[in-house]
């Protein structure tokens, strides 16, 4: 019996020793380095993050709804010394009143400078001294697996920090406007309501994305608009107050083409955009586009779906004579069309 107990004690000691070896000093140094990277990034970007309290006109026509309105909050971050703040469109749009709270407790009224619901981005501005802007990084250099830190005001808890990794790149996310936002960053840094508009930053404290959405009830699947997309949108918002896009004036539906049609015409795609309706007075109506036409290409590019067409209708094509390639009753027809500027929502 003594021998058996002695063997058990020896095995326990060995197991305990092995357990200790699993947490070597080198592991502690790695954990310290990770913690220090998060701390340094938060120290650098944290003072630029703001809380945005918004009052919006309530839906409906009742007296109480008009008086009380709808209250909400979100996040944003200062990106210039003179008070320009980047946030989400769904935070700032249709705001009757906006109040920005800085990390030092100061509060200022904010004005909407520009809004783009198609990328869910907006720029607001405050007049305040001694502001510290965040540094915008480069989203093209992001790698899957790298550290990602989200800073914001989830559920009203100001200056909350969560950390994770970049889970995937090049995602597409459907905005509330119905259009796809391309080149979206997926991360598992936890986001909650109120994080919207806050920055996603890397270990160097550079903003790589603007937090915008979560998928409920999934856990660890969150999305941020790439900062390179934001740079393009912001320049337009500061210049025009909106992002200029082209429109041909059709309501479309994604459809699969019959294989015999694809083979007969040697088409490069088996999908197209069926014209469900043509808006009166639009470029499409002026050019002779008809209900039932299937758009196959625009300006020399294949359009396999509505999102392809939206992507091609950029500001550069507004007022420019272009060719629309359509399938009409099994025949390929080329139509000359001049896009107009898309009306703001």
Image: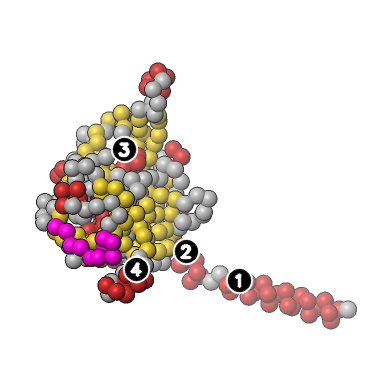
Q: Could you tell me residue 149's position as x and y percent?
A: 39, 55
Quadrant for residue 186, please give it: bottom left
Front residue of this view, candidates 245 and 10: 245
Query: What main secondary structure does the magenta stretch of the protein show?
Result: strand
Horizontal relation, residue 93 to residue 72: left or right: left
As drawn, the residue found furthest toward the right would be: 1
| Residue indicated by mark 4 | 270
Q: Of the two numbered discs 1 and 3 on the same chain, state the one appearing first in sequence.
A: 1
Quarter in which the C terminus is drawn: top left
| Residue indicated by mark 2 | 31
Q: Of the two numbered discs 1 and 4 on the same chain, state the one appearing first in sequence.
A: 1
Residue located 26% across and 62% down the image: 327
Dot 1: few (<14), some (14–19), or many (≥20) neighbours within 10 Å? few
Q: Residue 291 carries which label?
A: none
Element type at mark 4: loop
Asked if the magenta segment contains residue 334, the reply would be yes
Q: Could you tell me residue 306's position as x and y percent?
A: 31, 56
Q: Of the two numbered discs 2 and 4 on the same chain, state the one appearing first in sequence.
A: 2
Q: Could you tell me residue 17's position as x and y percent?
A: 64, 74
Numbered disc in front, either 4 or 3 = 4
Q: Are marks 1 and 4 in contact (CB under 8 Å)?
A: no
Q: Of the two numbered discs 3 and 2 on the same chain, state the one appearing first in sequence.
A: 2
């Amino acid at each position: 019996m003594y021998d058996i107990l002695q063997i058990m004690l020896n095995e326990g000691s060995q197991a305990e020793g092995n357990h200790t070896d699993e947490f070597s000093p080198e592991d502690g140094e790695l954990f310290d380095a990770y913690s220090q990277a998060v701390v340094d990034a938060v120290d650098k970007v944290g003072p630029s993050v703001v809380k945005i309290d918004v009052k919006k006109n309530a839906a409906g026509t009742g007296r109480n709804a008009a008086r009380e309105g709808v209250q909400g909050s979100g996040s944003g971050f200062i990106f210039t010394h003179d008070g320009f703040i980047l946030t989400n469109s769904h935070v700032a749009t249709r705001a009757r009143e906006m109040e920005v709270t800085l990390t030092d407790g100061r509060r200022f009224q904010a004005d909407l400078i520009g809004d783009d619901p198609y990328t869910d981005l907006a720029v607001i501005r405050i007049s305040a001294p001694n502001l510290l802007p965040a540094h915008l990084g480069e989203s093209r250099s992001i790698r899957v697996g790298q550290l990602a830190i989200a800073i914001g005001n989830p559920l009203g808890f100001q200056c909350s920090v969560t950390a994770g990794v970049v889970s995937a790149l090049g995602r597409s996310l459907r905005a509330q406007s119905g259009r796809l936002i391309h080149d979206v960053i997926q991360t598992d840094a936890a986001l909650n309501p109120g994080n919207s508009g806050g920055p996603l930053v890397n270990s160097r404290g550079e903003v790589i994305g603007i937090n915008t959405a979560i998928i409920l009830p999934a856990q660890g699947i969150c999305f941020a608009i790439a900062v390179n997309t934001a740079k393009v949108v912001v320049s337009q918002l500061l210049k025009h107050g909106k992002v200029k896009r082209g429109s041909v004036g059709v309501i479309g539906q994604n459809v699969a083409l019959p294989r015999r049609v694809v083979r007969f015409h040697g088409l490069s795609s088996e999908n197209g955009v069926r014209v469900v309706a043509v808006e009166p007075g639009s470029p499409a109506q002026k050019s002779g586009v008809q209900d039932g036409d299937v758009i196959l290409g625009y300006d020399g590019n294949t359009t396999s779906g509505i999102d392809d067409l939206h992507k091609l209708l950029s500001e550069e094509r507004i007022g420019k004579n272009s060719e629309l390639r359509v399938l009409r009753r099994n025949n390929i027809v080329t139509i000359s069309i001049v896009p107009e500027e898309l009306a703001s929502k």
